[in-house]
Image (cartoon, rainbow, N blue to C red):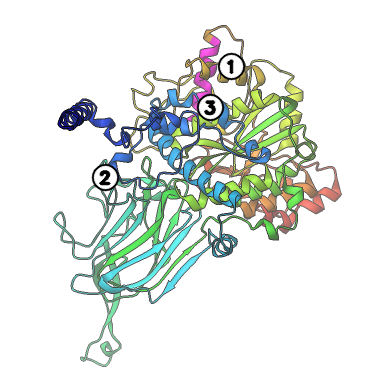
Amino acid sequence: MKKWYGGAVVASLFMLLLLRYGFMKNPVEESYLMNPFSSNGTNPLEWVRFTAPPALQNPGNASQVISFDIIALSLFAQRNLSKGEQHSLLAWNLLKNLINHSHALPNGVEAIKEAGSAWNSLMASVEEEKLGYVNDNSSRKAKEKQCPQFLNKINATEPESHFKLRVPCGLTQGSSITIIGIPNGVLGDFRIDLTGEALPGEPDPPIILHYNVRLHGDKITEDPVIVQNTWTLAHDWGEEERCPPETSEKNNKVDELEQCNKFVGKDNNLTVRVHSHGSRKSSMGLLGIKSRRYFPFKQGSLFVATLRVGSEGVQMAVDGKHITSFAYRETLEPWLVSEVRISGDVKLISVLAGGLPTSEDSDHTVDIEALKSVPLSLHRPVDLFIGVFSTANNFKRRMAVRRTWMQYPEVRSGTVVVRFFVGLHKNHIVNDELWNEARTYGDVQLMPFVDYYSLIAWKTLAICTFGTQVVSGKFVMKTDDDAFVRLDEVMASLIRINVTHGLLYGLINSDSQPHRSTDSKWYISPEEWSEDRYPPWAHGPGYVVSNDIAKAVYKRFNELRLKMFKLEDVAMGIWIADMIKDGLEVRSKRDDVLMAETPGDKKSYVLWQFLRHAMVPLRFFDERKPTTTFHNQHFPGANFNSTGNGGGNRSAIIGSIDTAQENQSKRRCFGGPFVSFILLKFF
């Protein structure tokens, strides 16, 4: 008996020593050795390669951090989805090689990792809904508007001078935040922060915009100053922008508006009446000059400040006057904003966030059947495939496109196919709304990455992939969700030029240089492009390539021979230049008759109604030439000398309108105040 017990003790000690040795040898994998006597010896991390992983319950736990490869592969794992749901992933499933291209563009790795987390979270909620786990309360909440059009709070001052307003679905171009308040307290200094979501494992969220009002100056100046900046855990505070600036050379423009209004900090001479008690003649008063420096905020005085989201940055207006502009910085874009924070010595009277991205309730959409995409069979030959760039929370723009130029007969008949290419959002609510939109209309192609601006060339690749591998498009076109495509003109032009192979068609730029100024939105470092000039390329709002070029793009992508470049329209030019070196004969056709750009969904509706009744050609002009002249002889009595609204590649909207002047009825219909009203709506 004693021998048996002794043997058991020795065996136990041997097992403990063996386990200790195993832990010491593989300390990183110790969390996976939960049961040493388990009969299943497969590493759980390897299961993800073949099955969909569960959503990460506690991303902050370091022991649950999963490698990039595992997260990336989970994006392409098999899911329990219906045929209709799978339709939104047709391009997605052909882009697995993006994992191998993830280091080629800024934020590529982060975008795929964040997409993996967002996708797993979305699929978990979809699965719960299918399995009936959603209770009555959850169902009722789901029917409520998840992405409200506006948010407001009156008497907003909170204890400890900290105010927070949750923005559930981010901001988009045209969104605004209006603050009514009074600087008070000892100093009257206060801060406005637009923050994003805190990343897993990070204690503080990134700050997309830090707006700091210092009424009594700081270490650099004793005068009042506004300081704008950004903050992330990885890069700390960025380079601050001051208003007034330290030097006049630093006053750049954003959306054609000054970074700092030139009057801020300058003497504001006021004319005052100085009364005299001397002679009767002088008792009426003498005119005098009192000098005071202008600053938009004043201690104890009411202000109305509005932050407005533009195409290139955020503008601040105070009491109706433009004060500052702040350009977006890399990876810190308006759709990431999840909260408005206001703190410091300020009494808040009201805070209103308006123009927020919101989806349309399909249950109350009268014309929903007419807006759904035409059923599509795989590898179907089509005359033209159009891929539309869009971001997740641009719900209104997509609805505007569906109700306007996607109603052309060519689209409704299926000879032209249109799809939106949309990356995932870091916000679960936005992804949920996007998923429902994709299921409802069937015209959304989801992308397996989070939608950073530096990655839009991946969407160009996806458009070429869909246009040649999902459908067989004779031609493939790329455009944006804020562009109005004159589909009749595009089709007529393609027939007229009669080139079906090696075609690049659009507004061709054959002599352009990389922007080397770090202040430019299109800044390109010598490491990204070392040459002095770009190959010929077509401007991004709209261009067409033939099937063979689009097919070659997809082939080179799979062969890892496609150079990734963050300016997508230039990237297409670079890809075509490489094809020419390999022997492809390419014909570039320049034509301005493509589209009219519209900076908002409401204006698209106006233009569509105008075109339905008029059908007049609209000329598209170079985005770098914002001034547009309309010749009065076309429309007697109308003044059409207009200037674009600025904003980089959104400046030129309509170039010219030509009418059959011999047709008197058309002249009466199009001329005079009616046309003035229609066109001025766009400027």
Main secondary-structure element of the magenta-colored stretch: helix
Q: CA distance from mark 2 to mark 3?
A: 31 Å
Q: Residues within 10 Å of mark 2 (few under 14, many from 20)?
A: some
Q: Which residue is mark 1?
A: 552
The amino acid pointed to by label 3 is Leu
Ranked by sequence position, the earlier of labels 2 and 1 is 2
Q: Where is residue 557 shown, x and y percent of the image?
A: 51, 19
Q: Nearer the viewer, residue 639 or 427?
A: 427
- Using the rendered image of the protein, determine whether residue 201 is visible from the camera's viewpoint: yes
Q: Which residue is mark 3?
A: 95
Give the quadrant of residue 38: top left
Badge 2 element: loop
**Of tags 3 and 1, which is closer to the observer?**
3
**Of tags 2 and 3, which is closer to the observer?**
3
- Give the side of residue 182 with respect to residue 476, left or right: left
Tell whether label 3 touches label 2 (CB within 8 Å). Answer: no
Does the stretch in magenta take in 520? Answer: no
Identify whether 279 is placed above or below 404: below
Q: Which residue is mark 2?
A: 233
Residue drawn at the location 39% of the way across and 20% of the way down = 532
- Give the side of residue 590 with respect to residue 371, left or right: left
The amino acid pointed to by label 2 is Leu
Q: Where is residue 247 shown, x and y percent of the image?
A: 23, 47
Residue drawn at the location 76% of the way across and 48% of the way down = 370
Does the stretch in magenta take in 573? Answer: yes
Q: Nearer the viewer, residue 635 or 338?
A: 338
Badge 3 element: loop
| Image disc number at residue 453 | none
Q: Which residues are magenta?
A: 567-580
